Image (cartoon, rainbow, N blue to C red):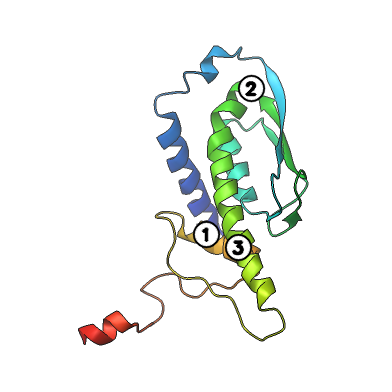
Amino acid sequence: MDSSFKAVISKNVADALAEDIGKGDLTAALIDADTVVGASVIAREPMTVCGELWVNEVFAQLDDTVTVDWYIGDGQHADTDDIVCKLVGSARSLLTGERTALNFLQTLSATATVTRAYVDAVDGTGTRILDTRKTLPGLRKAQKYAVTCGGGQNHREGLFDAILIKENHIRSA
């Protein structure tokens, strides 16, 4: 992973945590600071996993003593009820980071899973599944990464790196 991609992940996570936590997690603060717990992330339906880097970064930014052990990594298939990963650490840290971590994991796994379905549907035809720029604001690199985890290919990063003439351009000309 190159340093610019790591910087994007770090910023994605920092922005998401700042949005969610604000001045502090008032509810998690009610839990004894010394309480250590374990948690499991379990697939609720068949999926292509994506988001490991973002989940790891959530807990690295919150509390670098939290351990995350992955059983099914990015680009791999999980069936219903499979354990994707297990976490151990401060209850406060796990409770504070769980929603942010799950939001990244769910969003990116959804993109990878749908991509995988299309890639499988055209298997053997010589057709390639490419992504577009139609991504959530701030998550372009994350969703493009998810496309590759699902077996698709990246088309263009933005308006700056390739020409793509659409009907709106033709009408405007």
Q: Is residue 21 shown left or right of residue 50?
A: left
Crowding at dot 1, Cα within 10 Å, few <14 / some 14-19 / many 20+, comes out as many
| Residue 94 vertical placement versus 74 (above, below) | above
Using the image as rendered, state which of residue 138 and residue 171 is in the foreground. 171
Using the image as rendered, state which of residue 169 and residue 114 is in the foreground.
Answer: 114
Residue behind mark 1: 143
**Residue occupied by mark 2:** 91
Mark 3 vs mark 1, foreground winner is: 3
Q: Residue at x 43, y 68 (%)?
A: 133
Residue matched to label 3: 114
**Residue 165 left/right relative to 38:** left
Camera sees residue 86: yes
Q: CA distance from mark 1 to mark 2?
A: 30 Å
> As displayed, is residue 8 above or below residue 65?
below
* Residues at marks 3 and 2 touching, judged by CB atoms closer than 8 Å: no
Q: Secondary structure at mark 1?
A: helix
For mark 3, give the secondary structure.
helix
All told, the count of numbered labels is 3
Q: Earlier in the sequence, mark 3 or mark 1?
A: 3
**Residue 109 percent across, percent down from the top left:** 61, 54
Amino acid marked by disc 3: Val
Rate crowding at label 2 as few (under 14), some (14 to 19) or many (20 or more) other CA atoms within 10 Å: many
Give the SS element for disc 2: helix
Query: Which residue extends farthest left?
Result: 172
At x 35%, y 84%, the residue is: 165
The amino acid marked with disc number 1 is: Gln
Q: Residue 53 in the image: state x and y as whole percent.
A: 62, 49
What separation in Å lies between label 3 and label 1 (alpha carbons)?
A: 12 Å
